[in-house]
Image: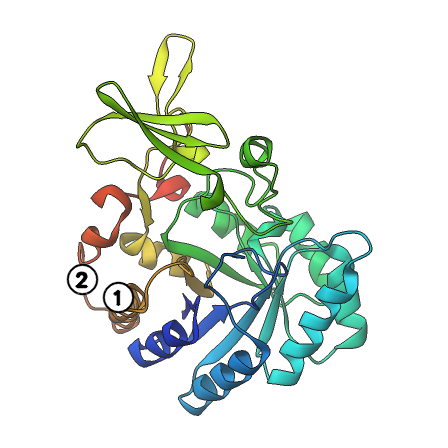
Amino acid sequence: MELVCPAGTPAALRAAVEAGAHAVYCGFADETNARNFPGLNFSREEMAAGIAHAHARGAKVLVAINTFPRAGAEPLWHAAVADAAAAGADAVILADIGLLAHTAERHPGLRRHLSVQAAAANPDAINLYAEAFGVKRVVLPRVLTVAEIAAINREIDVETEVFVFGGLCVMAEGRCSLSSYATGRSPNMNGVCSPASHVVYAEEGPDLFARLGGFTIHRTPKGAPAPYPTLCKGCFTSGPQTGHIFEDPVSLDATALIPALAKAGVRALKIEGRQRSRAYVAEVVRTFRAAVEAVAAGRPMPEGALARLSEGQARTTGAYAKTWR
């Protein structure tokens, strides 16, 4: 299986390639990609240089142009596709139907992958994207079980890519009404989920309050670990229950499920983390490359090597092997 690894900066791209990534995904430094944060992403010159560096070492580069264009601003997204093609990208990762149609018409030789932002989670939807826009691979949402993924693969004729480590989105991938409501910024249009510019920490009495867009997401005793106020991992009261209603503040780690995912027909394993450091990227990529090679060779996989890199040092297999509350 292909190991698809994150690169938020040119340094992270080089680290991922040197650590053994089969492919690296990254985006331009503007709102055309869903990790539009200050200090991240690539200029046009950096993208061309990064692609050349990866190709010289046998790795691919996939350019994420996976936000939804604003009405009247389509030329910005069209230019991103053209620039990715000119730089020699191996594929573009797209979500918007209009942008998929534009790319298929204007750049027919450029390989098209369907972003997880499109939230295509059944054979009918995936086959439509393949037939109408020539999509060759779909990144599946993180809300499917392994059995559901296997069933989907039996009814489609395109590659599937799944997340195996990093941040865990429990919503319909990028369509988070909670984050949009709290901050006024859409994750799949502005490229920002729970943006740092809307985060405030404040000490009130014996507790530390973490707020997002004016909403209290966590309240912890002073001196205790305070998680980042991501809405889906916040503490809420629902009926008689108070706690993490949607999901605990943990990281996805599906290392142990790699053999099952391979049997289910998954073609590529994706690591989340374009906001992470190059040291983090290198360590995660090395570990997963060893795991993928072990599976291919029929050897036992290394386990637990990434525990300290998980959010709150806690891990979950997400929907792959559990039922929702």
Kindly indicate the quadrant of the structure image that contains residue 127.
bottom right
Q: Is residue 314 visible?
A: no
Q: Which quarter of the figure is the C terminus placed in?
A: top left
Q: Does 61 sit left or right of 217 as displayed?
A: right
Circle 2 — which element? loop
The residue that mark 2 highlights is: 302
270 lies left or right of 111: left
Q: Is residue 201 visible?
A: yes
Q: Relative to 62, does residue 141 appear above or below in the rendering?
A: above
Q: Which mark is residue 303?
A: none
- Residue at image location 73% in from the left, 63% down from the top: 100
Q: Amino acid at mark 2?
A: Pro
Residue assigned mark 1: 291
Q: Nearer the viewer, residue 265 or 270?
A: 270
Residue 245 location, x and y as percent?
40, 24
- Whichever of callouts 1 and 2 sits on the residue coming sooner in the sequence is 1
Q: Is residue 261 left or right of residue 313?
A: right
